[in-house]
Image: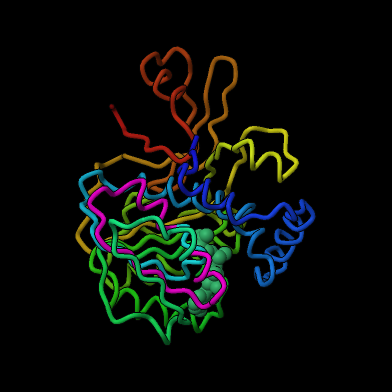
Amino acid sequence: MIYLLKQLEYSIQKIISSSFHQQKAVELRTRYQENKNHKGLYDTYLMSRMPATYAAISRVLSDLPLDSNIKTVLDIGSGPGTGLWAVLAHFKALESYTGLEGDRQFIELAKVLSEELKTLEINWKQGVYPKELPDMSADLVLMSYTLGENSQETLEKTLESVWKHNVSEWLVVVEPGTPKGFNTILQTRAYITTKGGYIYTPCKGNYNCPLSEKDWCHFSVRLARSSFQKKVKGATLPYEDEKFSYLVARKSPVRFDEGDARIIKKPVVRSGHITLDLCNESGYQRMTVSKSQKDIYQKAKKSEWGDDWERDK
Ligand SMILES: C[S@@+](CC[C@H](N)C(=O)[O-])C[C@H]1O[C@@H](n2cnc3c(N)ncnc32)[C@H](O)[C@@H]1O
């Protein structure tokens, strides 16, 4: 379960007026489903999407090694600055954060939300990518829920420029956990591997994705809803689940142990056995672990969708 940083939750509450209507959250969701954007629904984004995208980014960043020593971050399509908060929760050595965002109102919100963060160099730049990508390289470049909002041409030009000029080590791309979001991830993956980059997660190497065209690789993260969120959303459940697709790539070589795999679907627990959907360079395979396989069964019981599956450990 992921919890929103208290400081961010408090800042959002200050901005959200009592005029927040549940109807607006539905309208925003419909807009995204129709491939339209958030224009005019900024408060709604803060309340109904930012906590969820925060949770997805946070979950993805937890894949990176604790000692990755990330000091500089460039967040492209930064919106209200969601990524900053997730990065802050993970990388204590962070020194500077740059957000590039096309929408002035989101830039203003990002500034208001982060105004209390004095110990960090934060730059919110208004600009449209790929044309106005900053001339800088960063230890980590983040693109969350943004790349797929663009045309094919913009996507290709952006990836080319970002990988060449902006990424010094890590690239993190997060997209909605839909067939369209996964397609954006697949294209990113194909570009990175042809340019000599290394896939770090969720795949266990640079092999061709073995999923069939009808399937899409996505994961789920559970976010705790605060009482304020529950109140304004009229929700009763104390949590919500966000589905996402993602890719973490790096410039330095990545080594995987033979046979290690990723659990790419929710494990199915039946009486006497558990079924796991595993993916690695040998392809996509469904593995059934029976109760009689004592240790391995215990390991499968504790495993969750998205976890690593390490062979023989
Ligand atoms: C769904 S929001 C995601 C915001 C934030 N990254 C998050 O995860 O919450 C997508 C953002 O990308 C921005 N965006 C999309 N295409 C862009 C482009 N070509 N140049 C600059 N910003 C762009 C939009 O204005 C919007 O703020």
Q: Residue at x 59, y 15 (%)?
A: 271
Q: Residue at x 38, y 47 (%)?
A: 280
Residue 131 position (above or below residue 68): below
Q: Residue at x 59, y 37 (%)?
A: 226
Image coordinates of residue 50 in percent, x first then y, are 56, 54
Q: Nearer the viewer, residue 241 or 295?
A: 241
Q: Is residue 215 left or right of residue 302?
A: right
Q: Is residue 88 left or right of residue 81?
A: left
Q: Residue at x 45, y 39 (%)?
A: 263
Res 176 quadrant in image:
bottom right
Q: Nearer the viewer, residue 117 or 75?
A: 117
Farthest residue to the right: give it: 23
Instruction: Verify whether residue 137 appears in magenta.
Output: no
From where the camera sits, is residue 183 visible? no
Question: Where does the C terminus fall, quadrant-wise?
Answer: top left
Image coordinates of residue 231 in percent, x first then y, are 71, 40
Residue 94 position (above or below residue 38): above
Image coordinates of residue 10 in percent, x first then y, are 52, 46
Instruction: Verify whether residue 90 appears in magenta.
Output: yes
Q: Which residues are magenta?
A: 83-110
Image coordinates of residue 154 in percent, x first then y, are 49, 82
